[in-house]
Amino acid sequence: MNRLLASLIFFTRLPWWRLKSVPKEAFEHVVDYWPFVGWLTGGLMAGVYYLSVLFGFEPFVAALLALASRLLLTGALHEDGLADFCDGFGGGTDRTRTLSIMKDSHIGTYGVLGLIFYFGLLWSCIASQGEILIYAWPLFLLFDVTAKCAASLITGQLPYARTAEGAKNGVVYVGRSWQDWLLHGLRCAVALALPLALSVWIGLGRVVFLLPVPFVVECLLMLWMLRRLSGYTGDCCGALFLLCELSLYLTLPLFLYFEF
């Protein structure tokens, strides 16, 4: 329970810390319970989008409101990671230089361009499928949770690239033994059960064919991190989540317009 609460405290800006004092050690496992946070962040996006369209807003406005709601809930934590990831991997030439750039709080050209292209693509994907997503609102929840499941694998695949002293939040995420991998697989399955059930309920059970996409993206990005950093950072986790989720929205038209 402490680890789940630590994950909610870490990945959102709601005052969960008022419920209970959480030991620092619990924050070393926040990534393990990250998929469950998707119920909240993805659910918020789905609710805001659905209500916005219901109250007469055009899909492109509803898409912006849905994205803004998650930004407010998370404090743009993942987007900050994506910007630092783009700056580091775009401007760095070796491990030391890349880590140094990623730790710099100032945003650079690669970070700005990365956020522009990311939000442009994500907003366009959501807005262009507006009429469908008002009916298929559980996809917001499903894509958020699935992307978090894919991104959460990194802590078991690669070592943390910094020390606790060098980490931005002063916490080093714990790796996984084979027993931990089994438990994490179970956690991901439980987290995915709700959005998958909702998708089946509205008649979009075939969306399961899209779910391998973010895991492929995660593996490709993991190999890039392995080559450049020989590990990962917290910024890498945030970038992984956003890019894995974006891959689902980018491939959604293939699911909608082609029969399997």
Image (cartoon, rainbow, N blue to C red):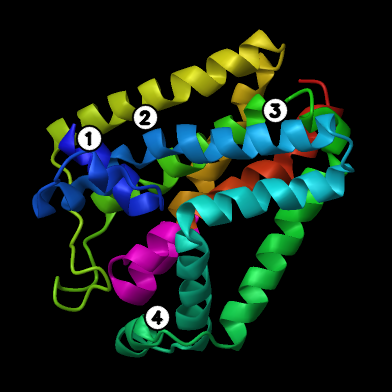
Q: Amino acid at mark 1?
A: Trp
Q: Residues within 10 Å of mark 3 (few under 14, many from 20)?
A: many
- Front residue of 133/237: it is 133
Q: Residues within 10 Å of mark 4 (few under 14, many from 20)?
A: many
Which numbered disc flags the more N-terminal residue, 1 or 3? 3
Is label 4 in contact with label 1 (beta carbons under 8 Å)?
no
Task: Give residue 188's mark.
Answer: 2
Tell me where residue 253 appears, x and y as whole percent: 80, 37
Which numbered disc flags the more N-terminal residue, 3 or 4? 4
Which numbered disc flags the more N-terminal residue, 2 or 1? 1
Query: Residue drawn 26% across and 33% down?
Result: 184
The answer to whether residue 149 is seen in the rendering is: yes
Residue annotated with mark 1:
181
Q: Amino acid at mark 4?
A: Met
Which numbered disc flags the more N-terminal residue, 2 or 4? 4
State the extent of the magenta-drawn residues as a range.
220-239
What's the CA distance linking mark 1 and mark 3?
A: 31 Å
Residue annotated with mark 3:
137
